[in-house]
Image (tube, rainbow, N blue to C red):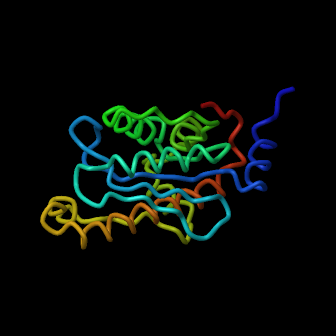
Amino acid sequence: MRLEAQDFLRLVENNKTLAIWDTESQGLNGDYGAMLCASIKTFGRKEPVTFRVEQLGNDKRLVRETRDYLEGFDAWVTYFGKGHDVPLLNTRLLKWGLKPVDPRPHVDLFFTLKPKLRTSSKSQAHLLRFLGTPEQKMSVSPDTWASLGTHFYKNMLEIVARCESDAAGLEALYNRTKHVIRDITR
């Protein structure tokens, strides 16, 4: 028996087993950079669960806890997560000698919406503005990223706030666009 995408989404939404998640990292690659934090929001709940590093470069606990928490869900929603967040998480898990995250049915809204929309930008921030959602993508100044090593605790507060904001914005984008989802893959 095959379950249609919309029926599956209603099922995981109602069972609170749909994770909406995002990460923040130093750089784009897991060999020269590390994860800084991950925010995982259970669909329909107000606050995300956020895991974060305690010091730069040591993300072993963060990636292990993120993997373990994500594996408690039946499905995931990300924005370019198949292109960045999942491969980054798995790269950092590999670095620490840990098993990769077990894949789940995964709605990546970037790849879902890109071929269906004709907008001037495909960024999450642009789509949230275009759709007029109350949740908007929070920007972080270049100085915050550049001075992370010298002002770690202060700057991490801002980076964590951005990650949590991204998860909330992603849920808003999902709610506005989920009716166009026809296929869910891992």
Q: Position of residue 157 (x, y in %)?
A: 32, 71
Pick whichever, 184 or 111, lies toward us: 184
Which of the 4 image quadrants contains residue 112?
A: top right
Q: Quadrant of the C terminus?
A: top right
Q: Position of residue 51 (x, y in %)?
A: 43, 58
**In this view, which residue lies farthest toward the top?**
1
Residue 26 visible? The answer is: yes
| Residue at 69% across, 43% down | 180
* Image side of residue 175 versus residue 131, left or right: right
Up/down of 63 relative to 163, above or below: above
186 up-or-down from 60: above or below: above
Q: Is residue 9 left or right of residue 36?
A: right
Quarter of the rendering occupied by the N terminus: top right
Q: Nearer the viewer, residue 43 or 80?
A: 43
Q: Is residue 148 above or below residue 124?
A: below
Between 159 and 55, which is closer to the camera in this rendering?
55
**How many numbered discs sit on the rendered protein?**
0
Relative placement, left or right, of 23 versus 56 is: right
- Horizontal side of 26 relative to 109 (left or right) equals left
Residue 118 horizontal/vertical position (percent):
53, 43
Question: Which residue occupies the extreme left position in the image?
Answer: 150
Place residue 163 in its image quadrant. Answer: bottom left
Q: Is residue 120 visible?
A: no
Residue drawn 40% across the image and 39% down it: 84
Residue 108 x, y percent position in the rendering: 55, 41
